Amino acid sequence: MSEASKNWLTFARQDLRMAELALTEGILNQVCFHAQQCVEKAIKGWLEQHGHTAPRTHRLVDLIQLLSPDVMSDLNNDLPLLDRFYIPTRYPDALPGTLPEGMPAQKDAEEALNLARETLEVIVRSL
């Protein structure tokens, strides 16, 4: 595995761990943020391993399109949902209406964390 890919995956694992720790503390916005970051960095690790420079974007919708179709086929429809957490979970003055229900709920956080775990596992297996 390339050094760049290893670095992205190390950071992805650290974001997953932060999401897990935030869940135990009930800091739900940070669970969702770090889950999104885990997925973003895992995908960038895959891209680096396959000869692509990781693009400077945080949008999973854009990154998913750069993967081989078979890599994330089971998750492609779910991953864009994590994009809705990127800005409003980081800034108290985020654009109104970004999350219609307000800040993430427990269910949102648990779903985001599970999706991050599954994505990281799929990416690592594909490498």
Image (spheres, rainbow, N blue to C red):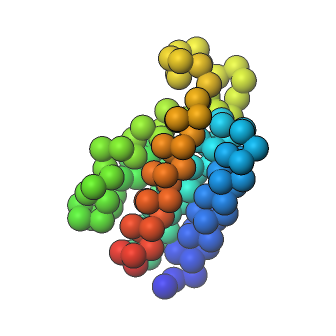
Q: Give the image quarter of residue 67.
A: bottom left
Closer-to-camera residue (110/1): 110
The spot of residue 17 in percent (x, y) is 66, 60
Residue visible at 39% across and 41% down in the picture: 80
Q: Give the image quarter of residue 85.
A: top right
Q: Is residue 51 above or below residue 70?
A: below
Give left or right: position of 107 versus 19. left
Q: Is residue 30 above or below residue 64?
A: above
Residue 91 can be seen, yes or no? yes
The spot of residue 76 in percent (x, y) is 31, 50
Closer-to-camera residue (81/110): 110
Give left or right: position of 60 versus 86. left
Closer-to-camera residue (42/103): 103
The spot of residue 90 in percent (x, y) is 68, 34
* Residue that sits furthest to the bottom in the current view: 1
Give left or right: position of 33 versus 126. right
Residue visible at 49% across and 52% down in the picture: 114
Residue visible at 53% across and 18% down in the picture: 101
The spot of residue 2 in percent (x, y) is 51, 83
Residue 15 can be seen, yes or no? no
Looking at the rendering, in which quadrant would you find the C terminus?
A: bottom left
Q: Is residue 93 above or below residue 80?
A: above
Disc count in the image? 0
Q: Give the image quarter of residue 27.
A: top right
* Residue that sits furthest to the top in the current view: 96
Residue visible at 27% across and 55% down in the picture: 74
